Image (tube, helix red, strand yellow):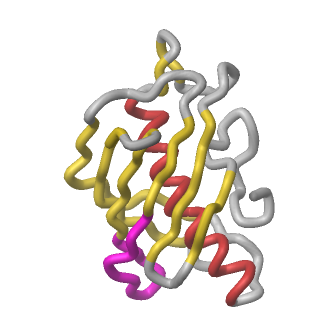
Amino acid sequence: MGTILLQQRPFRFVDTLESWDPKTTVTGFSIEPDVLLLENGLLSEAGLLEHMAQSCAARIGYETVYIKHEPVKIGFIGQVKDYKIARLPRVGERLRTTVELVSDVFGISLCDVSVRSGDQFIAKASLKTAIKSD
């Protein structure tokens, strides 16, 4: 994961890239006790959103490094819409997150992101992200 994400522990909120294709990416994350943005043993709303954003970054990072053969670039969250949380996940849970690319124009991507733990729905949002131009 180190080559496709710039974030490092303890601020890394994605630990596996389970699958990638041009439209759909699936990431995983095990919530450990030393992860930042925990509150009373639960991953906070901010931590959950950061996990979703890093899942989008993993999608872009994989494409940048392994398809385009370029170094990873810095990205930014431009917009979050329809952020819905069913519940906050707790330490010890394993998140599985699906990122569906809706559009990608001039380095600005719109993705629908859905987070699950086992068979339970955790959260979803639409994220617009941008890559820093050189």
x and y percent of residue 54 in the render? 55, 54
In the rendered view of the protein, which quadrant contains the C terminus?
bottom right
Residue shown at 51% from the left, 69% from the top:
25
95 displayed left or right of 81? right
x and y percent of residue 100 in the render? 39, 70
Q: Which residues are magenta?
A: 99-110
In which image quadrant can residue 101 be found? bottom left
Taking 91 as reference, is 45 above or below it?
Answer: below
Is residue 89 in the magenta section? no
Is residue 101 in the magenta section? yes
115 displayed left or right of 31? left
Taking 112 as reference, is 30 above or below it?
Answer: above
x and y percent of residue 88 in the render? 38, 27
Taking 64 as reference, is 79 above or below it?
Answer: above
Q: Which residue, as the protein is rendered here, is positioned at the far top?
A: 40
Q: Which residue, as the protein is rendered here, is positioned at the far left?
A: 82
In which image quadrant can residue 89 be found? top left
In the rendered view of the protein, which quadrant contains the N terminus?
bottom right
Q: Nearer the viewer, residue 48 or 134?
A: 48
5 displayed left or right of 113? right
Q: Nearer the viewer, residue 93 or 126?
A: 93
x and y percent of residue 8 in the render? 75, 44
Residue shown at 67% from the left, 54% from the top:
16
Most prominent secondary structure in the magenta stretch? Answer: strand
Q: Nearer the viewer, residue 65 or 93?
A: 93
Taking 22 as reference, is 6 above or below it?
Answer: above
Residue shown at 53% from the left, 72% from the top:
131
